[in-house]
Image (cartoon, grey):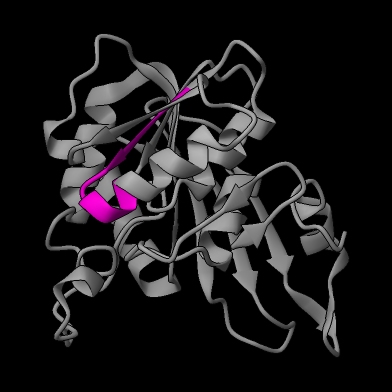
Amino acid sequence: MFRFKQFSIEDNRCAHKVGTDGTLLGAWVNLDHAKNILDVGTGSGLIALMMAQRSNSSAHIDAIELVASDCSQASENVTHSPWPRKISIHHTRLQHFESAKKFDCIVSNPPFFNNSFKPPVQSRITPRHTDTLPFDELIEHSKRLLAKDGRLHVILPKAEGTHFIEQAKNKSLHLARQWSFRTRPEKPIERWLLSFSQENASLDTGEILLYEKDDDWSESYQLLTRDFYLKL
């Protein structure tokens, strides 16, 4: 079990485990004025629960998940959280998800391995490989579900993030926010945190370091995650 300041997560039945990527994205997304939030590929429900903690009381989070075991465990995590009525879990894929409302915020820690070696266990393939949610389909269906001034937020490795930016541009989604994440100052960029808008916007850039020196979390990482980690 992963214990955070306001909720706990069980992920022993989940193919998509709790990790740094999800925690980073859940803490980084701008939720100003967001009332309708969609979490694509919720896994254990981590990001959905972070959105519930951070958003205002009138906001609602819909979280979709293709893998049945993840969906079941996410539902249990939500039920035992402080926000069981604020989050709705849906067992479906984005390509089939329909909603009468448009979303101010769509957030996804998407699968990103493409044309690479696949593990022998099927449950490990879905959350990691783009077969079930190719980038172009994530972009296309996010655009279908976004409100006019809504934003899509993702976290990806550097190379895949660069490719995603180009695909989004081809579908008229404009890069509005681009922050880098690296473990140490001397290390290369390991992740891009990216936000896209249907309207042109000035680009907001920044960087988050995990460690500035030794094994002490950096000030930027502590500031970002202090509302969640117990040790902060």
Placement of 158 over or under 39, stated as above or below: below
Residue at the image point whose x is 20% and y is 64% from the top: 126
Q: Position of residue 136 (x, y in %)?
A: 18, 49
- From this viewpoint, is residue 41 visible? no
- What is the count of numbered marks? 0
Q: Residue 53 vs residue 172: left or right?
A: right
* The N terminus: image quadrant: bottom right
Q: Nearer the viewer, residue 143 or 71?
A: 71
Residue at the image point whose x is 43% and y is 66% from the top: 12
Q: Nearer the viewer, residue 43 or 108?
A: 43
Residue at the image point whose x is 66% and y is 44% from the top: 7
Q: Position of residue 70 (x, y in %)?
A: 32, 53
Q: Which residues are magenta?
A: 61-71
Q: Nearer the viewer, residue 105 or 143?
A: 105
* The C terminus: image quadrant: bottom right
- The answer to which image quadrant residue 99 occupies is top left
Placement of 11 over or under 89, stated as above or below: below
Is 66 one of the magenta-colored residues?
Answer: yes
Is 93 one of the magenta-colored residues?
Answer: no
- The answer to which image quadrant residue 59 occupies is top right
Residue at the image point whose x is 39% and y is 63% from the top: 161
Q: Position of residue 37 (x, y in %)?
A: 46, 26
Q: Position of residue 29 (x, y in %)?
A: 59, 41
